[in-house]
Image: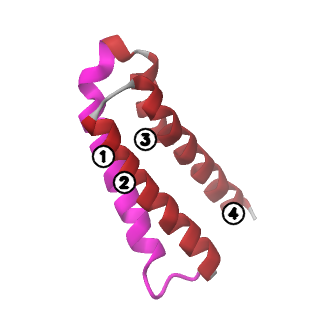
Amino acid sequence: MKSAARLQAIRDEWDLRQGELDGALTHNRKLWTVLLTAVTSDDNPLPAPIRQNVANLGIFIMNHTIGVMTAPAPEKLNVLVTINRELAAGLRASAAR
């Protein structure tokens, strides 16, 4: 959620906060690197289809991040914010069970 909030703040105040973009994208990339490492670990207890879906999302995030870094635009942050929030909500729901 923290990464999503940071990216949304930059998107919402693009003219004032565009200089923060590289740091926010680096933070998000590190977060997804941790998730990808965990989900592709042989000892991960999640079912294979879920692991594959999260891995596919991670690959998409990495590729999209490169696109944002290459040609920055505030609307390109929408998908990163949405995916991060949806994944966080899913993790919270799983933890509550």
* Alpha-carbon span between mark 3 and mark 2: 14 Å
Give the residue type at disc 1: Ile
Are there few (<14), some (14-19), or many (20+) residues within 10 Å of tag 2?
some
Residue at 29% in and 32% down: 71
Name the residue type under label 2.
Met
What residue range appears in magenta?
Answer: 16-45
Residue visible at 23% across and 23% down in the picture: 19
Q: Which residue is mark 1?
A: 66
Label 3 vs label 1, nearer the camera: 1
Q: Give the residue furthest to the bottom.
A: 42
- Marker disc for residue 5: none
Circles 2 and 1: CB atoms closer than 8 Å: yes
Drawn side of residue 12 relative to residue 69, left or right? right
The CA span between labels 4 and 1 is: 30 Å
The verdict on residue 20 being magenta is yes
Q: Which residue in the structure is indicated by mark 3?
A: 3
Q: Which residue is mark 4?
A: 94
- Residue 57 among magenta residues: no
Q: Position of residue 38 (x, y in %)?
A: 43, 73
Q: Earlier in the sequence, mark 3 or mark 1?
A: 3
Per the image, the residue denoted by label 2 is: 62
Q: CA distance from mark 2 to mark 4?
A: 25 Å
Mark nearest the camera among 3 and 2 is 2
CA–CA distance in space, label 3 to label 4: 20 Å
Q: Tell me which label, 3 or 2, sits earlier in the chain.
A: 3
In the image, what residue type sits under mark 4? Answer: Ser
Of marks 2 and 4, the one in the foreground: 2
Cα gap from disc 2 to disc 1, whole angstroms: 6 Å
Left or right, 82 with respect to 68, comes to: right
Q: Return the disc, 4 or 1, that comes first in the chain's sequence.
A: 1
Q: Which colour scheme appears in the figure? A: secondary structure
